[in-house]
Structures are given as structure tokens and as C-alpha cells.
Amino acid sequence: MNSHGLGAALQKIRLLISDVDGVFTDGSLYIGSQGNEFKRFNVLDGAGVALLKAVGLPMAVISGRHSGATIERMKELGLEQHLFQGNLAKIEPYREIRKRFGVADSEVLYIGDDLVDIPLLRRVGVGVAVANAPRMVQEVADYVTRSGGGNGAVREVIELLLNAQGLFDRALETLTKHTYKDG
């Protein structure tokens, strides 16, 4: 898709859906001797989610793996009610999410990083692959991020979307009006 076509497609987006491992994270899993799982999430992506929420654009998350660490991070981001885990065949959760938000395929942006994401990347209005996704995944995407998964790729996509829709300045203004108090 050329940049003009991408811009037009981005203007139609009403819902962002993302994979987790390899997108919100760098794909690494840290597992301790007690079976505790740890993941590294990037705060830039969290701030991007806050920008999206500041203008009322919804986001959902589909992960092929079930993970307590993912649940905790999505709770922090206020996305736990729109988190679907444990199904590598992501089409069923995708259908449920679309139904929940009442959007068409053309109104969805999906971010993925691996082979199991290809069916959704092909189906949605805008399919995005992270920079460190395999070539086969990048080739079906409409856009490939400059940032790798776990290194601000989600934030990059959110800024791209908000700028295409003329909402970035409003999102930033709304977000920075919040007053945070210590204690």
C-alpha cells in the first residue's frame, strides 16, 4: 500500500487490535525456577495506549499464549476487559472483538509479528508488522514499523494513526491535563 492509500485507510480506523508477545514485548520469555514468568514491557507503548484512550479510540489485545504477566500489564493499561489469550487461531477472538465494538474489517488496524498473525494482517483495513517480524509477515503488512517489538512499536503505530486522523494534538493535550498527586 502506498503512503496515500495508507493515509486513507488509517482515517477509517475505529479500533486498534494488537498481539502481545513480540509486539508489546521483544518476544523474550523469562521463566524462573518456580515457573514464574516475567516479560519486559516498554513504557513508551503504555503512554501510546494512554494517548489512544485520551481521544476515545478503543484497543483490544489478542495473545496466542496465556500469561499472568500479560494480564497484569493489561490491567495497568486498562485493557484487561478486552484481552483475549490462549488461542493461536486468532480469528475467533477477532470476530468476538469486532462484534463487541461493532466495526467492519476495514475499520480495524491490527499489529502482529509472527506467522499466526498473517490471517488477521490480510483481513483488516490496516495490517502492521513490527520491524523485527519475519520477512514473510512484513510482506503481507500494509506498514512495517521502524521500532521493533517491545521497543516502542505500539507507540509508533498509535502516533501514526492519531496523526493520520488529525487527533494527535488533542490526545496529547487531553493526556497532559491530568493532574497526578503523590501519595
Image: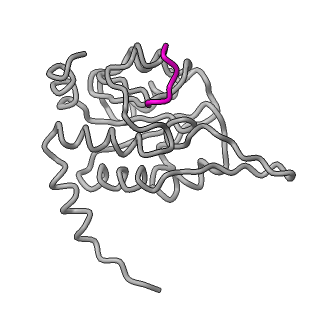
In the foreground, 132 or 55: 132
Q: Residue furthest right?
A: 33
- At 22% across and 30% down in the image, what residue appears? 10
Secondary structure character of the magenta stretch overall: loop
- At 50% across and 59% down in the image, what residue appears? 76
Left or right side of 108 for 67? right
How far across and down, in percent of the image, does residue 86 sit?
A: 64, 33
Tell me the quarter of the image containing the N terminus: top left
Left or right side of 66 for 137? left
In the foreground, 146 or 153: 146
Residue 182 among magenta residues: no
The quadrant in which residue 158 appears is top left
Q: Residue furthest bottom?
A: 183
Point out the stretch of residues depicted in magenta.
131-136
The quadrant in which residue 59 appears is top left
How far across and down, in percent of the image, does residue 2 sit?
A: 20, 17
**Colouring used for the render:** one colour
Left or right side of 142 for 134? right
Q: Is residue 122 above or below residue 111?
A: above
- At 37% across and 50% down in the image, what residue appears? 49
- At 59% across and 51% down in the image, what residue appears? 40
